[in-house]
């Protein structure tokens, strides 16, 4: 392994323009939080997303926390959260001492099941909010989920941290909820080395986020605070990196999609093996995923442990990652309720498991770095076929 090139799961890809924006920040001495790059990055993201306003923050988690606060979530409130996701999607609910209730996935998108969401409303009629996730860049069934939320008068928060560049029925992911979340973490489809964005058509909400995320300082000549604030704003240097990256977002999306297509072709003849679902598999679809990470999934009948492939790739100096472990299986959330998808109950292992558990047990994230060469892809594919064929 020592002599073999490292193949990454999804590492940053820089182009050069980033340095020009950062250089400008240094030349003008705008290196502290806020500044021209922050203002422009917000405007450029809002224009790209086709939404009214954006607030640049220190991370996607900070953006979710702001959304949770603006939704009025307080101690003891119930919030419906997606079960199959990274913990950052639901941790801010706990920051507010509220109670997450986890909602199962459905197999069409791996995202929040509308049927399970309806069941959750029957059990908990008055949740404070719903947080849906576009997992691995695949849009959830956002129209159905939004309709259910509207029916019950509950705000929808869309965590599109993994889905920048994805489209659902003609609209960019992140724009379906009252509040949307984007992330520019180091492994995302574009990165600012860190950082995130709160987006909304509600101008007052975005203004409030900017206020709260700069320590909630009142308009006074001295430091006065009438509310609890947070140090969540993005720096002008970080925003400069993001601006340079945004120029290449569509290019990154195309390359990610090409990686998935290469895997699809390579494994088409392997029985019982599939990839995570994307809407563009349907030629009539007006939606598409950015294919941030391509995941391989093994039919339960194969009785194949994905960690076997994980180890085999690791031995070849190739990075992969297990599917997100469902939140209801996390020790920290052991006391939280979980609502299974009733529509899938008889399909998944005789009803013994949930959909999210079945995906976790049978899937693995494959290397999806856009800098992978043809030789890199062949190395990955060779290991997969050798171990699973």
Image (cartoon, rainbow, N blue to C red):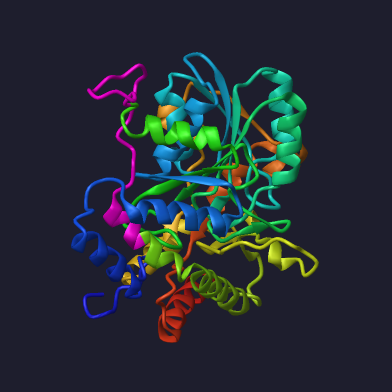
Give the main secondary structure of the magenta stretch: loop
Q: Compared to 156, does 308 lie above or below?
A: below
Q: Compared to 217, does 386 lie above or below?
A: below
Query: How many numbered discs?
Result: 0
Taking depth in this image into account, of 336 and 256 the one nearest to the observer is 256
Q: Residue extending furthest top?
A: 76
Q: Residue extending furthest front?
A: 221
Q: Compared to 264, does 69 lie above or below?
A: above
Identified at 53% across, 21% down, the residue is 72
- Residue 329 visible: no
Taking depth in this image into account, of 177 and 275 the one nearest to the observer is 177
**Residue 11 appears left or right of 99:** left
Q: Residue extending furthest right?
A: 284
Chain part drawn in magenta: 217-241
The x and y percentages for residue 22 are 26, 63
Q: Residue extending furthest bottom?
A: 375
Give yes or no for residue 224 being in the magenta stretch: yes
**Residue 161 appears left or right of 130:** left
**Residue 271 appears left or right of 254:** right
The x and y percentages for residue 100 are 53, 26
Q: Where on the picture, by quarter, is residue 143? A: top right
The C terminus sits in image quarter: bottom right
Identified at 60% across, 75% down, the residue is 261
- Residue 113 visible: yes
Identified at 33% across, 60% down, the residue is 240
The N terminus sits in image quarter: bottom left
Give yes or no for residue 109 being in the magenta stretch: no
The x and y percentages for residue 336 are 52, 23
């Amino acid at each position: 392994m020592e002599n073999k090139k490292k193949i990454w799961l999804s590492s940053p890809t820089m182009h050069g323009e980033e340095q020009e924006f950062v250089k400008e920040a240094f030349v003008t001495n705008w290196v502290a939080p806020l500044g021209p790059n922050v203002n422009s990055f917000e405007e450029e993201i809002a224009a790209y997303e086709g939404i009214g306003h954006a607030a640049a923050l220190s991370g996607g988690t900070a953006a979710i926390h702001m959304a949770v606060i603006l939704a009025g979530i307080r101690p003891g409130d119930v919030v419906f959260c997606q079960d199959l996701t990274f913990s950052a999607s639901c941790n801010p609910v706990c920051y507010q001492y509220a109670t997450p209730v986890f909602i199962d996935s459905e197999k069409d998108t791996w995202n929040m099941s509308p049927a399970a969401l309806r069941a959750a409303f029957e059990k908990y009629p008055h949740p404070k909010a719903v947080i849906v996730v576009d997992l691995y860049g695949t849009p959830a069934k956002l129209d159905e989920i939004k309709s259910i939320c509207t029916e019950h008068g509950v705000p929808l928060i869309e965590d599109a941290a993994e889905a920048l560049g994805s489209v659902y029925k003609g609209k960019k992911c992140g724009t379906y909820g009252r509040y949307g979340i984007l992330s520019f973490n180091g492994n995302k489809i574009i990165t600012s080395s860190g950082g995130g964005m709160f987006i909304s058509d509600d101008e007052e909400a975005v203004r409030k986020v900017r206020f709260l995320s700069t320590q909630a300082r009142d308009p006074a000549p001295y430091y006065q605070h009438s509310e609890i604030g947070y140090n969540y704003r993005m720096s002008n240097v970080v925003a400069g990196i993001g601006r340079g990256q945004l120029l290449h977002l569509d290019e990154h999306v195309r390359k990610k999609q090409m990686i998935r297509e290469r895997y699809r072709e390579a494994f088409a003849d392997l029985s019982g093996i599939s990839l995570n679902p994307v809407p563009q598999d349907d030629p009539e679809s007006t939606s598409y995923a950015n294919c941030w990470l391509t995941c391989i999934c093994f039919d339960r009948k194969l009785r194949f442990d994905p960690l076997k492939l994980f180890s085999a790739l690791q031995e070849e100096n190739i990075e992969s990652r297990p599917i997100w472990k469902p939140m209801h299986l996390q020790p920290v959330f052991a006391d939280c309720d979980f609502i299974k998808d009733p529509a899938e109950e008889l399909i998944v292992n005789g009803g013994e498991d949930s959909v999210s558990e079945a995906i976790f047990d049978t899937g693995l994230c494959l290397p999806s770095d856009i800098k992978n060469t043809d030789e890199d892809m062949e190395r990955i594919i060779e290991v997969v076929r050798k171990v699973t064929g």
